[in-house]
């Protein structure tokens, strides 16, 4: 007589089922994401954007030492948190590593000022986004800036208020944030006025809180 073939034991079957469950879940999830992406491509874009944003936030939370004395001096002068200046600097130009320090819409320098904001919106021709048509000599002239109510500051006393000079740029940002409410504790309101975007406020606040935690921890 032929011997009957033995089937898999109950333990083996259970073990295989346990192994297959995670594979099935992953397969189902990926299929759902792909199908959703086919129906609505923006979902995939948003997911990728969120992942990149998460990675970006966690790869640059170290403040370059050379900027800290400038942040602190500007913060003392204008009554704003120096960590807030660091957060803006990080968001605007990745601590001045952006090249060139000029945005597609015309924002200039280490802290990305629109020329009309830096020189003053009463300057002739300042309208719209504020790129203006301001000659370079007048753009950095403290007397012109004072006349038109701009935020540009000659921080190092060289006779020019230059958004491409790191000291001038950070002091100018401190001036703007202070006059926008940060000196009175209205941090979020001041950030919003710097760049009228809720997303911008969220991003700056994330780094501001991160830098504040590091400061309190003595890092």
Image (cartoon, rainbow, N blue to C red):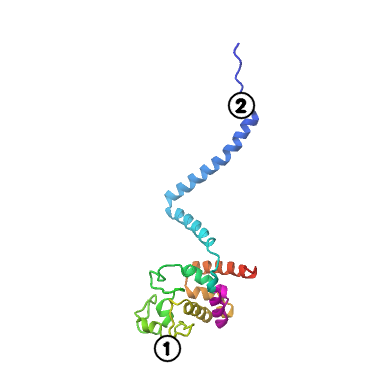
The quarter of the rendered structure image containing the C terminus is bottom right
Asked if residue 78 lies left or right of residue 98, the reply is: right
Mark 2 element type: loop
Mark 1 element type: helix
Please tell me the numbered disc located at residue 85: none
Reply above or below: 108 against 124.
above
The percent coordinates of residue 145 (x first, y second) are 42, 85
Q: Nearer the viewer, residue 206 or 67?
A: 67
Asked if residue 36 lies left or right of residue 76, the reply is: left
The residue carrying mark 2 is: 8
The percent coordinates of residue 88 (x first, y second) are 51, 71
The percent coordinates of residue 179 (x first, y second) are 52, 82
Q: Quadrant of residue 149?
A: bottom left
Q: Is residue 73 magenta?
A: yes
* Residue at image point 49% right, 46% down: 32
Q: Residues within 10 Å of mark 1 (few under 14, many from 20)?
A: some
Q: Is residue 81 magenta?
A: yes
Q: Nearer the viewer, residue 59 or 149?
A: 59
The residue carrying mark 1 is: 143
Range covered by the magenta-colored residues:
68-84
- Report the magenta stretch's main SS: helix
Q: Residues within 10 Å of mark 2 (few under 14, many from 20)?
A: few
């Amino acid at each position: 007589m032929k011997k009957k073939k033995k089937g898999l034991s109950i333990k083996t079957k259970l073990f295989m089922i346990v192994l297959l469950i995670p594979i099935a879940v992953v397969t189902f999830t990926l299929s759902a994401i792909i199908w959703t992406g086919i129906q609505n491509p923006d979902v995939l874009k948003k997911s990728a954007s969120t992942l990149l944003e998460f990675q970006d936030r966690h790869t640059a939370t170290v403040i370059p030492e050379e900027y800290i004395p400038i942040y602190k001096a500007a913060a003392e002068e204008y009554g704003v948190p120096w960590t807030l200046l660091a957060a803006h600097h990080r968001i605007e130009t990745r601590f001045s590593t952006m090249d060139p320090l000029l945005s597609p819409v015309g924002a200039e320098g280490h802290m990305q000022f629109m020329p009309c904001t830096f020189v003053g919106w009463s300057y002739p021709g300042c309208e719209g986004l504020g790129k203006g048509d301001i000659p370079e000599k007048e753009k950095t002239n403290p007397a012109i800036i004072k006349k038109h109510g701009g935020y540009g500051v000659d921080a190092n006393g060289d006779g020019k208020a230059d958004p491409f000079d790191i000291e001038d740029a950070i002091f100018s940002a401190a001036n703007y944030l202070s006059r926008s409410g940060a000196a009175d504790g209205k941090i979020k309101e001041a950030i919003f006025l710097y760049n009228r975007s809720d997303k911008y406020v969220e991003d700056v606040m994330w780094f501001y809180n991160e830098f504040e935690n590091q400061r309190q921890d003595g890092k």
